Image (tube, rainbow, N blue to C red):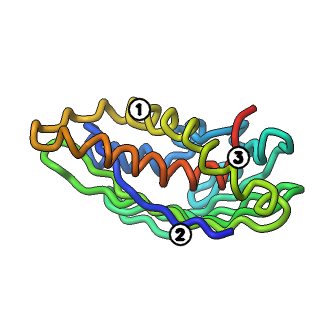
Amino acid sequence: MNIDLDGEFLVTASRSDAYRFLTDPTRFAPLLPHFKSLDEVTDDRFLMTIELGVPQIRGTAKVEVRAVERIADQVARFKSVARQTMGVVDSDLSFELNERGADTVVHWRATSKVRGGLASIAGGILTPLAKRNVADMIDSVQRALGPVAAPSQEGVAEAPAKARSFVSRLASWILALFGRRS
């Protein structure tokens, strides 16, 4: 099962602060759904333990994440492999940071390939389960980086639809990668 998603969100943190946060696994990793522990951290890789699966079939997975591209305050790209008895998830996650006035726009892209029994068992239920988890994760990231700037009156009507689209796409990727909490 392949999952390709992208989107963006706005934070009031400076581009430099947002970059430091997103590239610091001790700060960012605990906000991921089903995070259990950060096991090792070096300059270009880290290992973490997460829960992976669907409500009836769950287990822990070791996830190796390595930085494959970093351009200070602009771009961060990571590759990861999550291994669990029910399958393997290979992912590529990238962040591009741009200024919008005093705020920072975080553009993200995630591509994942879910292989093994997990993909065949969980295929149809991943999206509905993800919608519950991803909104909390996004809120946590935005709280850590500063509250979202209020939209102008022009953008009020389109903002909820864009947010729902973003949440839906990110939710699908996050849940496919990390499962759902029981």
* Nearest-to-viewer mark from 1 and 2: 1
Identify which amino acid the numbered label 3 is placed on: Gly
| Quarter placement of the N terminus | bottom right
Q: Measuring 51% from the left and 32% from the top, which residue is drawn there?
A: 136
Dot 3 corresponds to which residue? 179
Mark 3 surroundings: few (<14), some (14-19) or many (≥20) residues within 10 A: many
* Nearest-to-viewer mark from 2 and 3: 3
Q: CA distance from mark 1 to mark 2?
A: 24 Å
Earlier residue among tags 1 and 2: 2
Dot 2 corresponds to which residue? 68
Q: Could you say where residue 115 lies in the image, as x and y percent from the top left?
A: 77, 68
Q: Secondary structure at mark 3?
A: loop
Viewer-nearest residue: 108 or 129: 129
* Mark sitting on residue 144: 1
Q: Secondary structure at mark 1?
A: helix
Mark 2 surroundings: few (<14), some (14-19) or many (≥20) residues within 10 A: some
Does residue 13 appear to the left or right of 128 in the view shown?
A: left
Earlier residue among tags 2 and 3: 2
Q: Is residue 140 above or below residue 155?
A: above
Q: Are marks 2 and 3 in contact (CB under 8 Å)?
A: no
Identify which amino acid the numbered label 2 is placed on: Val
Q: CA distance from mark 2 to mark 3?
A: 24 Å
Earlier residue among tags 3 and 1: 1
Q: Secondary structure at mark 2?
A: strand
Quadrant of residue 32 within the rendered picture: top right
Does residue 101 appear to the left or right of 164 in the view shown?
A: left
Q: CA distance from mark 3 to mark 1?
A: 23 Å
Q: Could you say where residue 171 lies in the image, as x and y percent from the top left?
A: 54, 48
Q: Could you say where residue 26 lies in the image, as x and y percent from the top left?
A: 57, 40
Q: Measuring 50% from the left and 46% from the top, which residue is drawn there?
A: 24
Does residue 76 appear to the left or right of 101 in the view shown?
A: right
